[in-house]
Image: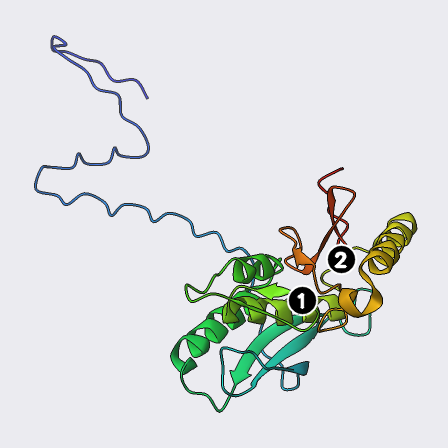
Amino acid sequence: MNIKIEKKITGYAVVTDTPAAPESSASTPSAAPQQAAIHQLGEPLSRPDKLVGNTYKIKTPVTDHALYITINDVIMHPGTPQEHRRPFEIFINSKNMEHFQWIVALTRVMSAVFRKGGDITFLVEELHSVFDPKGGYFKKGGKYIPSLVAEIGEVLKEHLYEIGMLQQQEKAADQQAFLAAKRQEYEQQQGAAQAQGEQGAFPAGASLCPKCSTKAVIQMDGCFTCLNCGESKCG
């Protein structure tokens, strides 16, 4: 449709189908800031009605009564080739109430980590690195335990070995033969009675190994060698 303009044009404006949004005035409150997206590491595991698990009894010099550590597992992907067990919750019970408060806190935090999913093997190293300011103790076999928390880490490691989440590193056959020969030679030099340790695992004169924390280091021919892990200062 044609429209004839009779007057002088003094200005113009472009008309669109969608009207422009009105400009916000100073009195108009600003839009709420967008919340940052939360990235979940994994979906928390839900508790089934039935769990399988193991209970471990430990007796330490720092507690008057034994501790009973129960670790329950959830079975993942049951009935499939990917079926496996993973820890779901942990409980620690004892007649000794001296450590009750922090033990309950520790078990709740560990259970929360278990249920979060993902790799939980890092907990073993974290627990092992806790040292008691009063000093640690030696377990049967000569292994040094720096604290009661580290003892709980030992139990967790044993459980992870059993369900397959951690793999034990076996010594090579030649290394085992070398350590056996080294021990036999040492015992012959020292005498069987003197060489036998109080626990019967390693010689009585053995010192603590900094690598495996076991009293299994002997000195022969000017060389310090650990009869447990094979660590040697002579290479």
Query: Quick one: label 2 or label 1, which is nearer the N terminus?
Result: 1
- Disc sitting over residue 228 in the figure: 2
- Whether residue 116 sits left or right of residue 50 in the image: it is left
Q: In which quarter of the image is the C terminus?
A: top right
Q: Do tag 2 and tag 1 residues touch (Cβ < 8 Å)? A: yes
Residue at position x 62%, y 81% in the image: 48
Secondary structure category for the residue under label 2:
loop
Work out how far the residue at label 2 is from the one at label 1, CA to CA, in angstroms. Answer: 10 Å
Q: In which quarter of the image is the N terminus?
A: top left
Residue type at mark 2 is Asn
Residue 51, how many percent across, how many down?
A: 66, 83
Q: Residues within 10 Å of mark 1 (few under 14, many from 20)?
A: many
Residue type at mark 1 is Gly
- Whether residue 10 sits left or right of residue 224 in the image: it is left
Task: Report the residue marked by disc 1.
Answer: 142
Q: Is residue 4 above or below residue 174?
A: above
Q: Furthest residue to the bottom?
A: 95
- Whether residue 210 sits left or right of residue 146 in the image: it is right
State the residue in front, 128 or 121: 128
Residue at position x 19%, y 36% in the image: 22
Residue at position x 9%, y 37% in the image: 26
Q: Is residue 161 above or below residue 234?
A: below
